[in-house]
Image: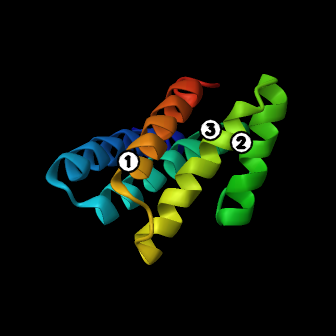
């Protein structure tokens, strides 16, 4: 049986793949939202394993802040902010393609840093 944390990690990987597909297809809104979803689900998976709250944006941000402190890596916060900008872009459609590409690259870095954390 798959744990809730593993479900979040799997969902993160699936959304990340869909974000890349949407970008190739030129669907910038879906690329943005899938990038955000990949980051959010990765945080949820780590938070679930650690027994931290992760049911809303506030809790996600607190979990990211806590992870940055625990890991001694302030960049974690900045990378997550790029994911958050993508989430906002899904609703507002204000980001140029190049900014979406850059933000997605930062989300990829974020996912790599969190992948496999206990």
Q: Residues within 10 Å of mark 2 (few under 14, many from 20)?
A: some
Query: Which residue has dot 3 on it?
Result: 46
- State which quarter of the image contains the N terminus: top left
Point 30% across, 60% down: residue: 28
As drawn, the label of residue 98 is 1
Q: Is residue 26 left or right of residue 15?
A: left
Where is residue 48 shown, x and y percent of the image? 63, 45
- Looking at the picture, how far across and down is residue 113, in whole percent? 58, 25
Residue 106 location, x and y as percent? 51, 37
Disc on the earlier residue, 3 or 1 = 3
Q: Are discs 2 and 3 less than 8 Å apart at CB? A: no
Residue 81 falls left or right of residue 86: right
User: Residue at 52% of width from left, 68% of height from top?
Assistant: 88
On screen, residue 59 versus residue 26, left or right, reads right
Mark number displayed over residue 77: 2
Residue shown at 42% from the left, 69% from the top:
90
Q: Secondary structure at mark 3?
A: helix
Residue at image location 50% in from the left, 49% down from the top? 41
User: Does residue 53 sit above or below 43 in this rendering?
Assistant: below
């Amino acid at each position: 049986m798959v744990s809730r944390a593993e479900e979040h990690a799997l969902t993160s990987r699936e959304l990340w793949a869909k974000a890349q597909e949407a970008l190739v297809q030129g669907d910038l809104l879906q690329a943005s939202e899938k990038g955000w979803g990949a980051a959010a689900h990765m945080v949820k998976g780590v938070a679930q394993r650690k027994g931290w709250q992760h049911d809303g944006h506030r809790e996600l941000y607190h979990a990211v802040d806590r992870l940055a402190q625990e890991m001694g890596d302030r960049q974690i916060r900045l990378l997550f902010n790029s994911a958050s900008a993508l989430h906002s872009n899904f609703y507002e459609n204000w980001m140029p393609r190049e900014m979406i590409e850059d933000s997605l690259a930062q989300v990829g870095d974020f996912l790599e840093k969190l992948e496999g954390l206990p």
